[in-house]
Image (cartoon, grey):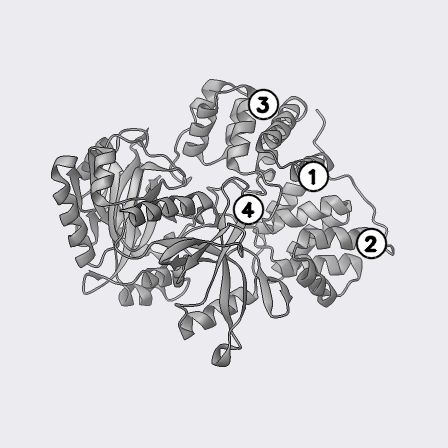
């Protein structure tokens, strides 16, 4: 069997990137996957990852750790171009991939001894960068990348760089890949979708399709491999939600870090909703959980909150704990934590996630021994006949310094990564959106040395691209202003006439009074009176709010205006 050349994959990238129609993109990917399964089946896993711009599956906590500066250093070494000149080009173009292609294409003085790259060689070298740490690690990473660049064509080099920077820019999201795998192997889309939801690994799903439909169906949740969290839509109101859903489990919504806790082989790991492993930062939560549940394999979900005098305190304090790498024992004393559990997805060698919520909750109540440190979420079963119970729970939750309440359909399964009407959230404060910073500008007056205003974007769930929505500056106190500026300086990809373009990485929660139409922004809308609430380091880029959610809020806004 022939090994798939990297050039062949790059040609597919190019073909997809100039195709705007989702169905055409799906067909291109499906045809390619089918060809790979026949000629090079051992590469199907890696190719499925690379089509997502990834080298590791979403559940893995391995990170490449190769910065733009390392790429620039590598290019400088092989091309003789100064790092400063490369950075100037980047400030103008804004795409490190295009810069890489241009530099290698235009360099006439160097003739490389080129060895044709294979998909296996590219992904192996990139994965190897993870193994280097400590003294001389940067040089070792540069050498791994140099080995690829010296054999790459300009076009191949562009996509190597885009893979490293995790900005593939071909417009292929998970939905298109699910559809493509379904079409390539003639397997019902629902089967592929379910397998992906439970395994959180499209590469594994694609590999299983080469075996049998039954092999795909057998994929399930595995302790140690975190899955995407089920997501909530907005509630139009307490009474309206209950009347629409019928019988619901109504529970307190806590203002903390949502966690997925895996216990297997007598070890416990804690993952955030962005699937980041934060076990070492939260040692007491490990202790609390291991005391509260039996020593069998399980996955439970809950919310960790920070407390003072056993009362909830600001979300920002829990962020300090999660991000802490040193002096953890000291922080443990300064910022005590407790956890509220609300779901169980796996227990004692059995997947529970697909069972009705009410059954999962009953199991949770049986297996958890509560304490001052581990509690179950406060809940009530509510129907249209006893809406007042939900109102009472909402009032109690807010008075107790919690965020609000959740509505969950009692017979619903757990749907990883899905946002649907089986789970709604209701909060008393102004509506908020989680937006990614994509641009900005310097402040004025005493804030002139800081980035004082940020251009915020949300995800277009049709194209997979970020679209601009609003500029926001209100809500930034001096401390946050300074820390954000330091952070964002590392993410600048273009600066012109005081305006900045940033690599999408930092997410802000923004409150607002109203959505309005606007030709100034790519979404076609903007926000009135935006105010930055907090940095959302607990969520990932795939959980940035979407244009669909924006339109849902707008619909609710219009209904409320009519009423």
Q: Earlier in the sequence, mark 1 or mark 3?
A: 1
The alpha-carbon separation of the residues under discs 2 and 3 comes to 39 Å
Within 10 Å of disc 3 (Cα), the crowding (few <14, some 14-19, many 20+) is many
Residue 259 visible here: no
Q: Mark 3 or mark 4: which comes first in sequence? A: 3
Q: Nearer the viewer, residue 362 or 439?
A: 439
Spatial CA span between label 4 and label 1: 17 Å
Q: Of the numbered discs in the image, which one, if any, rests on residue 465?
A: 4
Residue at image location 41% in from the left, 50% down from the top: 277
Answer above or below: position of 85 versus 160: below
**Disc 1 from disc 3: Cα separation:** 20 Å
Which one is nearer the viewer's eye here, 65 or 307? 307
Callout 1–callout 3 Cβ contact below 8 Å: no
Q: Determine which of the numbered discs, if any, sits on residue 184 in the image.
A: 3
Mark pair 3, 4: CA separation: 25 Å
Helix, strand or loop status at disc 1: helix
* Mark with earlier residue (4, 1): 1
Foreground residue, 438 or 189?
438
User: Of label 2 and label 1, which has the lower sequence position?
Assistant: 1
Q: Is residue 409 left or right of residue 130?
A: left
Of badges 1 and 3, the one in the foreground is 1
The residue under label 1 is 14
- The circle drawn on residue 106 is 2
Coordinates of residue 324 in the picture (x, y in percent): 40, 62
The residue mark sitting in front, 4 or 1, is 4
**Pointer 2 or 3: first along the chain:** 2
């Amino acid at each position: 069997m022939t090994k798939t050349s990297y050039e062949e994959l790059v040609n597919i990238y190019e073909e997809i990137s100039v195709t705007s129609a989702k169905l055409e993109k799906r067909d291109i990917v499906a045809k390619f996957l089918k060809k790979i399964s026949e000629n090079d089946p051992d590469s199907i896993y890696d190719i499925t990852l690379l089509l997502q711009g990834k080298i590791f599956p979403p559940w893995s906590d391995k990170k490449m750790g190769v910065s733009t500066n390392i790429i620039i250093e590598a290019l400088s070494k092989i091309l003789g171009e100064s790092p400063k000149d490369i950075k100037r080009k980047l400030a103008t173009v804004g795409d490190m991939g295009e810069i890489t292609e241009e530099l290698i294409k235009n360099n006439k003085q160097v003739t490389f001894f080129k060895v044709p790259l294979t998909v296996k060689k590219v992904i192996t070298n990139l994965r190897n960068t993870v193994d280097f740490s400590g003294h001389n690690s940067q040089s070792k990473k540069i050498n791994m990348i140099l080995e690829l660049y010296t054999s790459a064509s300009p076009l191949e080099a562009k996509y190597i760089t885009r893979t490293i920077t995790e900005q593939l820019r071909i417009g292929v999201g998970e939905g298109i890949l699910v559809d493509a795998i379904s079409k390539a192997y003639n397997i019902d889309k629902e089967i592929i979708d379910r397998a992906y939801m439970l395994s959180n690994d499209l590469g594994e799903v694609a590999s299983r399709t080469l075996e049998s439909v039954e092999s795909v169906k057998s994929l399930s949740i595995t302790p140690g491999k975190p899955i995407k969290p089920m997501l909530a839509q907005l509630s139009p109101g307490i009474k309206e939600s209950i009347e629409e859903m019928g019988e619901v489990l109504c529970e307190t919504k806590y203002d903390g870090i949502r966690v997925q806790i895996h216990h297997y082989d007598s070890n416990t790991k804690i993952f955030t909703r962005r699937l980041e492993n934060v076990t070492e930062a939260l040692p007491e939560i490990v202790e609390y959980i291991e005391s509260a549940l039996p020593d069998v394999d399980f996955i439970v979900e809950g919310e960790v909150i920070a407390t003072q005098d056993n009362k909830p305190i600001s979300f920002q304090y829990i962020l300090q704990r999660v991000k802490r790498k040193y002096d953890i024992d000291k922080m443990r004393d300064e910022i005590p934590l407790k956890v509220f559990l609300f779901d169980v997805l796996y227990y004692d060698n059995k997947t529970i996630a697909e069972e009705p919520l009410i059954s999962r909750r009953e199991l949770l109540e049986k297996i958890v021994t509560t304490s001052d440190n581990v509690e179950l979420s406060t809940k009530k079963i509510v129907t249209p006949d006893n809406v007042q119970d939900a109102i009472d729970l909402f009032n109690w939750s807010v008075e107790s310094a919690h965020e609000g309440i959740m509505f969950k359909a009692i017979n619903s399964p757990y749907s990883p990564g899905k946002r649907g009407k089986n789970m709604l959230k209701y909060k008393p404060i102004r509506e908020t959106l989680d937006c990614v910073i994509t641009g900005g500008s310097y402040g004025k007056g005493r804030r002139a040395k800081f980035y004082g205003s940020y251009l915020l974007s949300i995800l277009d769930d049709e194209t997979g691209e970020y679209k601009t929505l609003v500029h926001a500056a209100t809500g930034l106190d001096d401390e946050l202003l300074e820390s954000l500026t330091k952070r964002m300086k590392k993410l600048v990809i273009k600066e012109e006439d005081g305006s900045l373009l940033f690599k999408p990485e930092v997410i802000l929660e923004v409150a607002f009074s109203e959505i309005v139409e606007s030709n100034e922004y790519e979404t076609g809308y903007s926000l009135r009176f935006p105010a930055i609430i907090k940095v959302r380091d607990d969520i990932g880029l795939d959980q940035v709010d979407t244009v669909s959610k924006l339109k849902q809020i707008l619909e609710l806004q219009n209904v409320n205006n009519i009423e």
